[in-house]
Amino acid sequence: MTSAPGATAPARPAEATSPGRPAGSVRRRQRLRRALTGWAFSAPFTVLFAVFMALPVVASLVMSFTDLRSTDLRNPLAVNAVGLDNYTRLFSDDLFLRSSVNTLAFVVVGVPLTMVLALAAATALNSGLVRFRALFRVGFYLPVVTSIVAIAVVWRFLLDPEIGLVNNLLRLVGIDGPSWLFDTRLALPSLIVMAAWRNFGFLMVIFLAGLQAVPADLYEAATLDGATRWQQFRNVTLPMLRPTLLFGGVVTGIGYLQLFEEPFVMTQGGPLSSTLSVSFHIYNQFGFGNYGYAAAASYVLFLAIVALSVVQFRLLGERN
Amino acid sequence: MVAKDTALRTRDRVAKTVLYVVLVLGLLAVAGPFVWMALASLKPEREIRQVPPTWWPETFTLDNFRELFSRLDFPLYFLNSALVAALVTIGNLLFCSLVGYALAKLRYPGKRVLFLAVLGMLMVPGMVTFVPQFVLVSNMGLTNTYAGLILPFLVGPFGVFLMRQFLQSIPDDLIEAARVDGAGEYRIFWRVVLPLCRPALATLGILTFLGSWNNFLWPLVVATTEDKYTLPVALALYSVGQNRTDYGLLLSGAVVVVLPVLIVFLFLQRHFLRGIATTGIK
């Protein structure tokens, strides 16, 4: 955090020499005015932020230690503190464990896949060989700005076992395509591919900016030393891009840990919970009215995200 | 030497060709589904279900859209989406730039704590606030109202972060000069600071609008009657309800959801993508 401007500026001479009044009182009044101005600018945001974000974050934590249910809302006295019960129950809840495994698989496979696609696209577009760069960039970015609900409609149709485009294409080469979203082994992989398809454009734009910031003379020096393209990529591009890659990895990881929309609109968590994610499980518990339990599960997810961010700061810190 | 040069040039040409083939295939894989969606929405249901599928429509029809707009309430959902997205965007632009200015350029007690709270909020997953927000909004009697759809999204930590980072790059001299000229803090903000913020405001505006237009979990639980549905809610409910296999209807509905966003994006893409890139690198 850089210090605010004016912090180092000397006090205006008028303050010190102001006749008739003790300097301290003037300074105090000026400090008060500055505080009032600062808070006048901050107040509208702060009120909304406090009510609709900060308060819910605290409320969620408090709720997670109670047995609050939707039916208790009219009768708050019926709510009991239950300590860590919700948390211990989570770890004997088969569906929660199942959803955690699914979410982890989604992150562990999905993040590298998305990053590789994004890096490949960014490197290709940055290679200087390509014309129509803007066209490709816009095309690859298209799914990022599109509603997931609309994407789900299209993909469900594309993956339809009978009339879908994918299986019709496979039929052309003599393969009898599976029913992608109705197979317990294929549903989650299908969602992973779809998520990578949908999100790599965002990382591509970030990586492209990172690539353009790599000084050209590094490549010139490498070329003089006789390095091949691949060697340049390994020994110049990747190390220079490290902070950008880490940023991209963590942003994507945080997003993927919260997997919800894809299974919600594509598979409803099925078949047989094979695409149930932690967020989806929380949503279901909310739907059943188990507010305390849902809040506890959401805090476990929160912890996972914090842990991921801490790991990133460690990795970034190492470099400096 | 000459032989080596030609060899290099041939290799370059091969590399270039491979690159183009891969990129074009990639573009087909990414944009293809959208093109196909648009074409299919103009086919009658019977042709959509045809095996093997047609690419170009054999029979053009606007029946799917006619049904959306006359039998179903899609014009209303469209207006709801637009109203909510517009107000959410205005709120974010105004409130986030105000506080962003204070955090970047003013000195006052509590500023550090406020900024740390904003940074912390960036890491909080949506599900943590989801349940209490719903309890709060229903206790305020705001379920199934526009206020209930809008209020929780009127400000966001990302917008504050973006505006503060941008405002820090504005030279203090400009602000100090206006102050010496006797301009009040609000005048300085409106006349000096905001005009300089145009690029950041554009990025934030587009991002917020898209986020709100595409948002569907919150309106799904808050809008309980059809007259408050937004487009994604209506489409999501149709696609899991009794219309789940009515592909003509669903695909044309998807076109209606995607088209406005697509137009906005294509017009502003240059600006927009640059904005995204700078948020990534800081």
Image (cartoon, grey):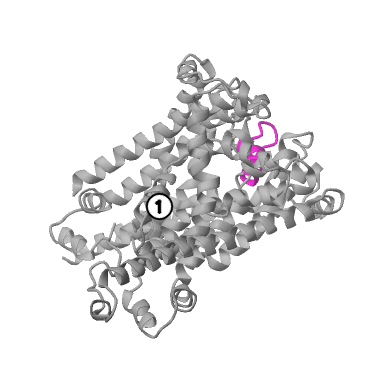
- Residue A208, above or below A185: below
Q: Residue at x 48, y 44 (%)?
A: A54
A268 or B223: nearer the viewer? B223
Tell me if residue A153 is in the magenta stretch. Answer: yes
- Residue B148 sits above or below residue A19 on the image: above
Amino acid of disc 1: Leu
Q: Which residue is drawn at the image coordinates 37% and 77% (left, top)?
A: B175
**Picture residue at 81% right of the left edge, 55% below the top:** B62
Is residue B260 in the magenta section? no
**Type of secondary structure dominating the magenta stretch:** helix
Expressed as whole percent of the image width and height from the top left, the position of residue B262 reads 61, 59
Circle 1 chain = B
Left or right: residue A51 versus residue B66 is left
Within the image, what quadrant is residue A181 found in? top right
Q: Outermost residue toward the left?
A: A225
Report the front residue among A101 and B64. Answer: A101
Q: Which residues are magenta?
A: A149-167
Say which quarter of the image contains residue B268: bottom right
Considering every residue shown, the one lying at the far top of the view is A92
> What x and y, as percent, mark residue A159?
62, 36
Residue linked to disc 1 = B114
Residue B240 visible somewhere in the drawing: yes
Q: Spot the residue most to the right.
A: B71
Q: Quadrant of the N terminus of chain B?
A: bottom left
Q: Look at 60% across and 45% down and name the residue there.
A: A148
